[in-house]
């Protein structure tokens, strides 16, 4: 018995080592390299924001809505605050939100998808719940959350988390159903390996790929959710900057100060571009397997 | 098809009923007393109590729910606290604007998405493939609100060729109405056509490797004819599904686009109702949005089965 589990766990370890190597290979393709480089740069900017802009995002100058100058590369906003500084701090808000809410959604969604392991009824119940969530168009779900929690960080976090659940949950359930029928899983069960061991050692490593790809894809959607809710005034509230919130206020000054929306707009575009390229590269690497 | 619909009925009914329960419970989950909100900031305790009784908030929750559901089904949607007008009237007045926008955007999405996809899928030179790839990736990464803002800056502020805010109903005055509609519709359609294009292109790539294409080549059929008659025709199925699935996203995008272009549609109404906690309006909009999304999903499955005889409804 012990020898059995040792060999099977050895196989699983090779499997997950292979996964990491596949992702690294994805990063060496042109798309992957550009996507990863771009994302790395944006994360670095966001992390270094307090160092780059010691004045913070709330430093008000004398000139409101000033044009570009040496001191303010993209000019200032309606309260005389530097647009570049606010954009980078806004990026920080966005990235913090994405990098916490999307993984949370992936983990909880995957667990919901795997609930069928515990009992058939629980699994079916979870799928029905995911059906209901899927019925809600994203922004309508976001509005419902805002109605209960009020505007702000927590409403955005919950919205991004909940909207992603069906994506991960359905994927996990489909993966589970495919893997459960595979010979090596059947073999392990015949050998008397416990269900939980089969699940963690054999099934999970094999459904990790689609989860990683989906998480990268969902990052783009999550950026849109933040920006969408903030741009209509239901997201991050002033004075805290976020890319969407800046587009919301900037849109009022389009005719007098177009650079106001271009700063956050450009960064937002780079952010979604980075995740789109990354998810493309990961998807291709995983499919090639 | 009737058997298929009957099979799907339980799950559709379940989703819709759960949605009504969620919509019904929202105001009760939210902090604050709906009666106090409805009464306004200067109401006395007695007035609030009177309104609570009038709204039926003293009765058991289940009874309240069935009352509300009954009203929803018979078209008695209640009154908006914010505008002091019937909800049905508010929605009716704004429905046309949103329908106009989404229909126009859907048409643009189909033309642009399938166009770029077929171009990429039938391209042979590296340059044209790269162009198609770059176009669809760029469109996909461009969210509707950003496309909207860029279009406003470019065509509304810099060149001033199209109006950027407000609207005129297309049915009232087609010439002016369409001018107001172009920018918002394009902005809404752009990101979604990117996804459609990628899908069409990859399923065309796939179709090129099929045996029937080899056979056609062996028979000496021209490349253009193969593309048109075999490859494209067999590649549109997934695109139809994607267009259906994206309809929900389309509605969501419409909310944002309406804000940017100051169009007085349902999105504007939804946002202002959420901001002022106007529950009667929000509840109807939530239920309505989910009903539309679910119906479109069903229609999509039927459309796919009609297009592709291999897909059997009822599976």
Image: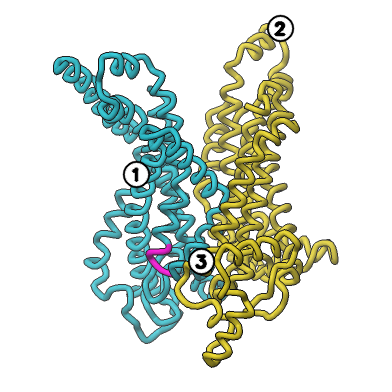
Chain hosting mark 1: A
Q: Is residue A148 visible?
A: yes
Q: From the viewer's side, name the closer residue of B209 and B236.
A: B236
Position of A13 with respect to A231 (left or right) is left
Position of A193 with respect to B167 (left or right) is left
**Position in image of residue A98 (x %, y %):** 37, 54
Chain identity for the colour yellow used in the image: B
Circle 2 Cα neighbour tier, 10 Å, few/some/many (<14 / 14–19 / ≥20): few
Rounded to the nearest whole Å, what is the CA distance between mark 3 and mark 2?
A: 57 Å
In the picture, the quarter occupied by the C terminus of chain A is top left
- Tags 2 and 1 on a common chain: no
Q: Quickly name the residue at label 1.
A: A107
Q: Quickly name the residue at label 3.
A: A231
Circle 1 Cα neighbour tier, 10 Å, few/some/many (<14 / 14–19 / ≥20): some
Main SS of the magenta segment? helix
> Which residue is pictured at 63% across the width and 51% down the height?
B189
Q: Quickly name the residue at label 2.
A: B219
Chain identity for the colour cyan used in the image: A
Q: Does dot 1 land on a helix, a strand or a loop? A: helix
Position of B162 with respect to B39 (left or right) is right
> Which residue is pictured at 70% across the width and 67% down the height?
B77
Highlighted range, magenta = A151-155
């Amino acid at each position: 018995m012990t020898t059995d589990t040792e060999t099977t766990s050895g196989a699983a370890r090779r499997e997950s080592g292979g996964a990491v190597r596949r992702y690294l290979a994805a990063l060496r393709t042109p798309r992957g390299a550009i996507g990863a480089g771009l994302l790395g740069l944006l994360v670095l900017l966001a992390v270094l924001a307090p160092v780059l802009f010691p004045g913070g995002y709330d430093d008000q100058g004398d000139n409101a809505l000033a044009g570009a100058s040496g001191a303010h590369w993209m000019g200032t906003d309606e309260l005389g605050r530097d647009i570049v500084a606010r954009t980078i701090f806004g990026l920080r808000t966005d990235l913090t939100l994405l990098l916490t809410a999307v993984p949370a959604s992936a983990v909880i969604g995957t667990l919901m998808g795997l609930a069928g392991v515990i009992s058939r009824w629980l699994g079916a119940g979870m799928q029905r719940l995911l059906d209901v969530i899927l019925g809600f168009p994203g922004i309508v779900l976001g509005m419902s959350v805002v109605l209960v929690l009020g505007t702000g960080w927590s409403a955005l976090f919950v919205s991004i988390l909940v909207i992603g659940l069906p994506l991960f949950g359905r994927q996990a359930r489909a993966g589970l159903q495919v893997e459960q029928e595979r010979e090596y899983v059947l073999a392990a069960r015949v050998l008397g390996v416990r269900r939980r061991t089969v699940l963690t050692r054999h099934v999970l490593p094999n459904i990790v790929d689609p989860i990683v790809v989906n998480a990268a894809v969902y990052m783009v959607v999550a950026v849109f959710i933040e920006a969408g809710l903030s741009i209509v005034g239901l997201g991050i509230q002033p004075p805290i900057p976020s890319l969407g919130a800046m587009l919301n206020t900037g849109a009022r000054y389009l005719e007098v100060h177009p650079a106001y929306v271009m700063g956050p707009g450009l960064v937002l575009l780079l952010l979604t571009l980075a995740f789109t390229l990354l998810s493309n590269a990961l998807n291709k690497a995983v499919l090639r397997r | 098809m009737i058997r298929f619909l009957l099979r799907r009925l339980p799950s559709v009914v379940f989703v819709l009923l759960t949605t009504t329960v969620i919509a019904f419970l929202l105001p009760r989950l939210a902090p604050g007393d709906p009666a106090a909100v409805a009464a306004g900031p200067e109401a006395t305790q007695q007035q609030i109590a009177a309104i609570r009784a009038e709204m039926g908030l003293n009765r058991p929750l289940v009874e309240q729910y069935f009352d509300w559901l009954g009203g929803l089904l018979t078209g008695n949607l209640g009154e908006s606290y914010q505008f002091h007008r019937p909800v049905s009237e508010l929605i009716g007045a704004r429905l046309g604007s949103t329908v106009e926008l989404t229909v126009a955007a859907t048409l643009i999405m189909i033309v642009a998405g399938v166009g770029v996809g077929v171009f990429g899928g039938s391209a042979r030179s590296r340059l044209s493939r790269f162009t198609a790839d770059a176009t669809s990736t760029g469109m996909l990464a461009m969210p509707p609100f950003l496309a909207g803002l860029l279009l406003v800056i470019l065509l509304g502020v810099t060149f001033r060729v199209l109006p950027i805010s407000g609207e005129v109903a297309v049915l009232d005055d087609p010439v002016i109405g369409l001018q107001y509609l172009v920018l918002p519709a394009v902005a809404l359609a752009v990101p979604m056509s990117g996804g459609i294009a990628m899908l069409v292109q990859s399923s065309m790539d796939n179709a090129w490797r099929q045996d029937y294409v080899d056979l056609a080549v062996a028979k000496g059929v021209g490349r253009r004819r193969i593309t048109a008659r075999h490859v494209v025709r067999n590649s549109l199925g997934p695109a139809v599904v994607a267009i259906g699935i994206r309809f929900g996203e389309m509605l969501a995008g419409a909310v944002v686009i309406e804000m940017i272009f100051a169009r007085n549609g349902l999105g504007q109404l939804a946002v202002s109702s959420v901001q002022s906690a106007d529950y009667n309006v929000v509840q109807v909009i939530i239920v309505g949005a989910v009903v539309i999304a679910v119906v479109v999903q069903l229609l999509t499955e039927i459309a796919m089965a009609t297009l592709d005889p291999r897909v059997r409804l009822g599976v």
